[in-house]
Image (cartoon, rainbow, N blue to C red):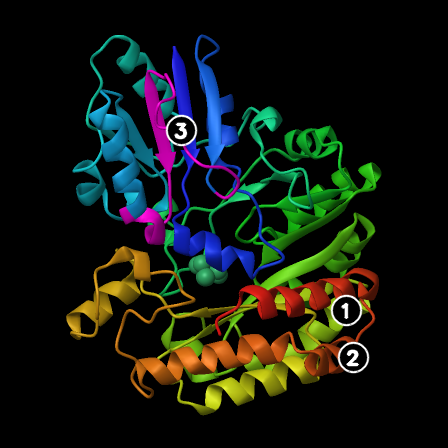
Amino acid sequence: MKLLLITASAHEIRQIRKTRVINFQQVTMPYLAALTPANWEVEHIDEGQERIDFNIEVDLVGITFHTPSANHVYEIAAEFRKRGIPVAMGGPHVSLLPDEAENHADAVFIGEAEDTWKEFLADFENKQFKKRYEQKNPSSLINLPMARKDLFHRRDHSGGIMFATRGCPNKCEFCALAIMYSSNFRKRPVAEVAREYGSFEGKVIIFWDDNIAADPNYAKDLFKAIAPYKKWWSSQTSIHAGWNDELLELAAKSGCKQLFLGLESVSQISLDHANKSFNRVEDYYKIIKKIHSYGISVQVGIIFGFDEDDKSIFGKTMTFLEAAGVQNATFNVLTPYPGTPLFKRLESEGRILTYDWSKYNGRRDVVFKPKNMTCDELLEGFKRVNSQFYSLKSTGKRLSKSTAGLWWTLPLNLSYYFSYKLYGPK
Ligand code: SF4
């Protein structure tokens, strides 16, 4: 039996990714391949790297995708189904909107797929598969196979990608995680994570976790276990980690080079209304300074367009990022992904402007009516901050505040500067 797995990415998303020097390949499909029984021959196409050949001879196609690629994926599915090849779909958008996805697929997967994927393949081989597979309870993360490295398509900084934990205990209004994983935070056994960590040939490992230090004791054990491999790693965490000296010291000793903090906003009132009041703006400086003091650089995630944001938010954000010496930042336009509490609220307020999912990209389009700005003002401010942040002037200001990781954050900032000039919005 032959299976083609596709990590889908619409044209617009591929364009947006070009401006992002740090972007990672997704591990979902190489991991799903590892869960596939050995009698299946598996191919993987990552659309970020290669095009799809619709004439490929396979028995089944499986596609994973995010909301902005949904329209594109429905076209891909139609092409394969026209050729008589069944298509199964899963991933974030399918879990958020299974009824819609079901109209374009032969089978859909809601939630995690550790158990349902194997069940489906057995049903498929018996020619009796169902239209819908739903993982009712959170998957156990014990004894998981390692993702298949032969199906990774990139050998660059994101060649070493894996996960230690899944989910996040928080419930921010705009975040889809709580729906996908029922706010259920789980951890893989430390020894299994360490074994996979050590199995990569490269020096750099990205933990594709949403909140790697959500359980500080687990995180400390993990950092102790991976330290002997002497690799460099990065991951995402909530800012709670920044208060914990012991955790930061162990992280640094184990090779942590950068932590991604979802700050989201420098406006406390915006954070409070987004159900993220555990982020305290008044603590941001102290936390970033502390992380820097362990030689760990900081990347932050910032979202513009909260109801309390007016045009002054862009300047305030830049002032803060420069004063705090933040090394890298990812900016997003607030995007209400379908199914999230934010989407439901904005829809009930009559503020959703489009249901064209290709516009739910968080970078090029505003899909809802902001409260204290026009859509154009929001988009213009967003673009301005992007180009200001990675300007030579701001790079100089920010990186002079802390030398944490300067040897790599300086070239990285310069790469962003040039890629934004080349591919950024004109
Ligand atoms: S802390 Fe981050 S990952 Fe967790 S719910 Fe909030 S936005 Fe999502």
Judged left or right of residue 422, residue 64 is left
Task: Give the image quarter of residue 323.
Answer: bottom right
- Amino acid type at mark 3: Asp
In the rendered structure, which disc, 3 or 2, sits on the residue that comes first in sequence? 3
- Asked which secondary structure carries label 1, the reply is helix
Q: Are marks 3 and 2 in contact (CB under 8 Å)?
A: no
Instruction: State yes or no: Cβ of the residue under disc 2 lies below 8 Å from any atom of ligand 1.
Output: no
Q: Residues within 10 Å of mark 2 (few under 14, many from 20)?
A: some
Marks 2 and 1, how far apart at CA: 10 Å
Label 1 sits on residue = 292
Label 2 sits on residue = 401
- Amino acid type at mark 2: Lys
Q: Are marks 1 and 3 in contact (CB under 8 Å)?
A: no
- Asked which secondary structure carries label 2, the reply is loop
- Amino acid type at mark 1: His
Task: Give the image quarter of residue 74.
Answer: top left
